[in-house]
Each structure stands twice: as structure tokens, then as C-alpha cells.
Image: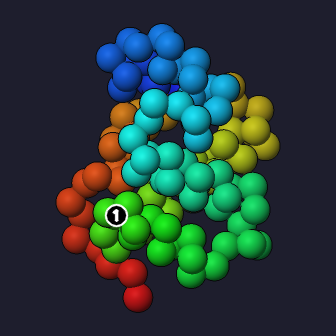
Amino acid sequence: MNHGALLRKQSNDDQELVLEIGRDYASSRLEEQDKVMLAFAEKLTFSHTEMDKNDIESLRSVGFSDENILDIIASVAYRNFSNRLNIAIGLDEDVTEGDQDLLNIAKSGHSMSLA
């Protein structure tokens, strides 16, 4: 199952929402919390040297707990690691078994905290 298939499943097969997210998640019908989380993930992935405490505060401002934030960071780091590893070894797998859990990780109740 690839990312698109997982997104369709999570959106209850709302094809228009999937297209909106693909075009520009920031102007899509996603909840504000999801948009802020995606902006954080995008910045951590593509502009990590520009990250600062304001990025963490942006997540807190939309209701994410420190535990949620740590889960988001770990999820983004895992996906970046996994994708780069797969590219380096020529593996054409886009999605791992754990991706279903990773899609919901930000709203999980894990007992971790930020220092």
C-alpha cells in the first residue's frame, strides 16, 4: 500500500480531499491542527537547519501535548530515515507495515515528554 492509498483510507475515500492535500495541504479542508503538523513535518524534512523553538510552540498552540510533539518528531525522523535508506539500497517500497500507526501517532497517548 502506498502513501496515496493510505491517505484515501484515512480520508474515508474522499477523493477530492486527497487531491486538495496533494495540491496544497495548507489551503485544503484539513483541520488547522493537521495543517500545522504537516507544516512542521515539511520544515523538519526540507529546512531542518531553520528549526527553532517557535516551531514547537506552533504545535502547542493548536493543542498538541509534549508527548504528541515528540511522537510527531519521531515519526518524521523515521519516515526520513526509511525513505533515504530505501532510496540508497534501491528498495521500491513506499510504505512499511508501521505506517498505519504513524498516520495517527500525533494523537496517541504515549507517555513521553520533551526535555
Which residue is at 50% across, 46% downward? 35
**Whole-percent x and y of residue 64?**
34, 63
Residue 29, quarter of the rendered image: top left
Q: Secondary structure at mark 1?
A: loop
Residue type for callout 1: Phe
Percent of width and height locating residue 112? 29, 74
**Horizontal side of residue 53 vs 46, given as left or right:** left
Q: Is residue 34 left or right of residue 89?
A: left
In the rendered view, does 49 fall on the left or right side of 27? Answer: right
Q: Is residue 23 visible?
A: yes
Query: Camera-side residue: 79 or 89?
Result: 79
Residue 84: x %, y % from top left? 72, 47
Coloring basis for residues: rainbow
Q: Residue at x 78, y 43 (%)?
A: 88
Quadrant housing the C terminus: bottom left
Which residue sits at x=65%, y=61%?
A: 44
Residue lying furthest bottom: 115
Nearer-the-camera pick, 42 or 105: 42
Q: Is residue 51 above or below residue 13?
A: below
Above or below: residue 109 compared with residue 31: below
The residue drawn where x is 51% and y is 20% is: 18
Q: Is residue 31 left or right of residue 15?
A: left
* Above or below: residue 83 compared with residue 90: below
Residue under label 1: 64
Q: Is residue 1 visible?
A: no
Crowding at label 1, few (<14), some or many (≥20) Cα neighbours within 10 Å? some
Q: Nearer the viewer, residue 13 or 3?
A: 13
* Number of marks: 1
